[in-house]
Amino acid sequence: MDYIFYRLYIMYKKHGDPPILSTCIFLSYIVGIAIVILFFCIQKWADIHNVYIYFLNGISSLIFLIAPLFIFVTFCVMVYRKKKIEGLMKKYQGCVRNKLIANWMIWCIPIYEMILGVLIYHFLIN
C-alpha cells in the first residue's frame, strides 16, 4: 500500500491537486470497493448456508460499509505525515517498479477490483 500511496502522491502532486487528501480518497475508494465485494460475498454465503448474520440487515449494514472507510481515511491521514512521505520518497525513488508499472495501471486498480468482484459473485451463485 505504501508503494501505491507513493505513486499516487507523485501523480497528484504533478497535477497540482492536494496530494495527501487526494491519495487518501483514492485509496479509500479502492478499500470501499473491496468492502462492498466482501459484504456481498458474506451475504451470499449466508443465504446459501441459511445463516442469519445480524449486521447484513437494516442500518447495521450501512454501518458495516461506512465505518471501515471512515477508519481507513483517518488512518491514512494520521499515518502519512511529512516524515513518512519523505521516507517513501527516498525508498521508492529510482525503484525498478517505477518503470515496470505505468501510471494507468495504478489508476485501473478499481476497475480490476470490480471485475474480480463480479467474477467472485458469479462463482458464488453457481
Image (cartoon, rainbow, N blue to C red):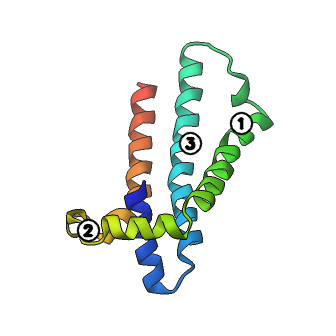
Corner quadrant of residue 68: top right
**Residue contact between numbered discs 1 and 2, judged by CB atoms under 8 Å:** no
Is residue 18 left or right of 11 when viewed as pictured? right
Expressed as whole percent of the image width and height from the top left, the position of residue 5 reads 44, 63
Is residue 86 left or right of 100 when viewed as pictured? right
Q: Tell me the distance, in whole angstroms, between the alpha carbons under discs 3 and 2.
A: 28 Å
Residue type (three-letter) at the residue carrying disc 3: Ile
Q: Kindly identify which residue carries mark 1.
A: 61
User: Depth-wise, is mark 1 or mark 2 nearer the camera?
Assistant: 2
Q: Secondary structure at mark 2?
A: helix
**Residue contact between numbered discs 1 and 3, judged by CB atoms under 8 Å:** no
Residue type (three-letter) at the residue carrying disc 2: Asn
Q: Which label is found at residue 35?
A: 3
Is tag 1's residue or tag 3's residue first in the polypeptide sequence? 3
Seen at 46% across and 72% down, the residue is 9
Q: Which label is found at residue 98?
A: 2
Q: Which label is found at residue 43?
A: none
